[in-house]
Image: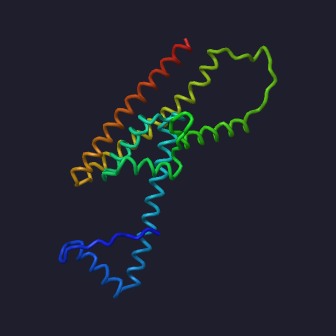
Amino acid sequence: MKKRKKVFHRPGSPKAKSLQRFKHGWENYPESMESRRKRGVIGNSKKHERSRQWLQNYFAYEISDHEISPKDFESVCRYLIELKGKGSKLRSVRAYLKRWGFIKWDTVKQVYLNCYRIKLEESSRTHLDRTRVPAKPSPAHRVTQAQQVRQAEPSELERLKEVKERTLKSISWSIDQAEKETELTRAQGWEKALEILKERLSKIDLQISELENCGQELSV
């Protein structure tokens, strides 16, 4: 176990007074302090679980690529740092995502693998294979290439609309957080995150309009 470096605080400083109150509480009110400690552990656990769940949805739904280049992955990490707004290091965010299995480095292709996107598509393929009923080939039921495009479009369009809905919720939540924030540095971080989310929303709207126009041309 790594030995922690002892930190000395100036007598009378806010940190020294806080530690003194903490020590006094444990010496005189141990039961109350223990209940506070347990509540803090439960609260932190729920907070970390919500954070990991958000990251799972982010890598599974909002990053559609299986493989992420180092340059794009750096942009993803910087976006997460801006959302956090606490000056985290790029190396720390990368190590966290690796440790919890959000991404994996492919030494052969020299790219990062989006693990949750791969898992999502594997599970959806498995579900389709289980529910698919084999049919006998018949000339009367041959599907043309244009019909295949029509059948494939609604699922892609539906996915983009779901991503748009989640992005709008993220924008709304980020605006609320930015309005509540009192620290200037963190408020600027939320503003940068909002710019990124709005840029992503405009790209999603463009993709949706292209797919809808393509569907209208095929139906003519």
User: Residue 165's x, y, as percent?
Assistant: 44, 38
> Looking at the picture, how far across and down is residue 167, in whole percent?
41, 39
Q: Nearer the viewer, residue 104 or 129?
A: 104
Q: Quadrant of the C terminus?
A: top right
Report the residue that reaches farthest toward the right: 136
Question: How many numbered marks, from 0 up?
Answer: 0
Residue at 26% x, 75% y is 18
Give how far across and how far down residue 132 sits, in percent: 73, 33
**Relative horizontal placement of residue 118, taking residue 183 as reference (left or right):** right
In the rendered view, how is the structure colored? rainbow
Find the residue positioned furthest to the bottom. 28
Task: State left or right for residue 194 relative to residue 44.
Answer: left
Which residue corresponds to the image point at 80% horizontal and 20% vertical from the top-left? 137
Give whichever of 109, 85 is nearer the camera: 109
Q: Is 70 rendered above or below residue 216? A: below
Q: Residue furthest left?
A: 12
Whether residue 171 sits left or right of residue 65 in the image: it is: left
Residue 106 screen position, x and y as percent? 55, 39
From the viewer's perspective, is residue 203 above or below residue 146? below
Q: In this image, 101 relative to 195: left or right?
A: right
Q: Residue at x 51, y 36 (%)?
A: 111
Of 120 and 212, the residue lying toward us: 120
